[in-house]
Image (tube, grey):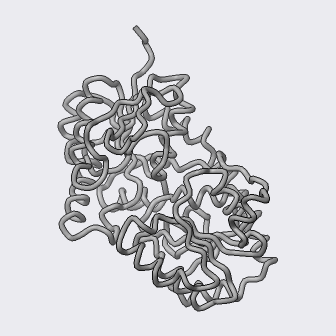
Amino acid sequence: MSSRRKVSIVGIRGLPPRYGGFETLAHFLVERLGEKMDVTVYCSGPDSPERQDSYLSARLKYLPIRANGAQSILYDFAALMSSCIHEDAILVLGVSGGIFFPFARLFSKQIVLNIGGLDWQRAKWGKWASRFLKLSEAVAIKWTNVSVADNAGIAAYLKAEYGRDSVLIEYGGDHNSVPAITEERRQRYPFLNAPYALAVARIQADNNVEMVLEAFSQTPNQVLVMVGNWTNSDFGRDLKAKYSDRSNMHLLDAIYDLEELNTLRAHCAVYVHGHSAGGTAPSLVEAMYLSLPVVAFDVNYNRETTENTALYFKDAAELAELMNRVSPVEWEKQRTVMKEIADRRYRWSIIAEKYADQLND
């Protein structure tokens, strides 16, 4: 029988990563912790069309429940209870299952919680869903062994709101590279032949998608490429219908092939980051590692991530003014600054070691 520590990862749809930052985090933890621990990742069966028994060094365990929507609470509960029986330590990503933490602690397991952003503040939730998530967050913070904050702003919030100290563990960006532009991609994306701004985001209100689109509608001399899941909601479909006829805007569906996405990211003139709901956004970290100049929505989380050295906007008018005012020389200076921060702080070797320390306690 293996004497290695058994660890589970709970709270994502599953692996391989297809959905967002937490799945990317799980991927790189599995890749780097597999030599030291036996890792199990809980996955949503209905959300996993191609079921694999394993991924890298991790065992995948499927639950017959969806990871999102109304079933997400039951999904997290089932994964937590199974982990309490079979594992030594549990890494929980997100707070939707937080109301079950008191039961999980009865098993005397090490529970490490990364709350991500302040999910209850997101505009997409109704009043009652928001209240439930806030309650679940409060219970989770009280009953977890270790609270992980991925941003100094989140750490300050946990201290002020709950009197709880946390461990700062951010995200890595060094899995990204700069692909050459192939002739095939140049033909598929003609905008690669001239300067353009790029934004990559889930199409939801708290990412200020409409604000960014409105800003570029006011600056027809500036080209915007925005990549996102436009067809997943009425909000996205309505925005795409409203702005897709603008000659300076290219509204692309989500791209999950990393090399293809990096072709668009690495060769843009400036990266536009509209996220507002809290935490260190993996997409921003990745942009910084790719040496992209950054203009970000002005909240403390984005300022913490960029060490107050990016450019910031509060509304569409400010973003439009920045895009018209900032010179190419200034954008080039930004590239150096963003890369230096990313090299110093956002490497997966650093991130994985910090998680290993917490899961081994």
In the figure, 111 relative to 71: above or below?
above
Residue occupying image coordinates x 34% and y 24%: 88
Q: Is residue 78 left or right of residue 114?
A: left
Residue occupying image coordinates x 55% and y 49%: 171
Residue occupying image coordinates x 68% and y 62%: 264
Determine which quarter of the picture holds residue 82: top left
Determine which quarter of the picture holds residue 81: top left
Q: Is residue 200 left or right of residue 71?
A: right
Q: Is residue 204 left or right of residue 259?
A: left
Q: Check the picture and name the quadrant holding the C terminus.
A: top left
Residue 128 location, x and y as percent? Answer: 18, 66
Determine which quarter of the picture holds residue 160: bottom left
Residue occupying image coordinates x 25% and y 54%: 138
Q: Which residue is nearer to you in this view: 273 or 280? A: 273
In the figure, 298 relative to 149: above or below?
below
Q: Check the picture and name the quadrant holding the N terminus.
A: top left
Q: Is residue 233 left or right of residue 309?
A: left
Q: Which residue is nearer to you in this view: 131 or 266? A: 266
Q: Which residue is nearer to you in this view: 169 or 183? A: 183
Residue 19 location, x and y as percent? Answer: 45, 51
Residue 319 location, x and y as percent? Answer: 59, 84
Q: Which residue is nearer to you in this view: 27 or 334? A: 27
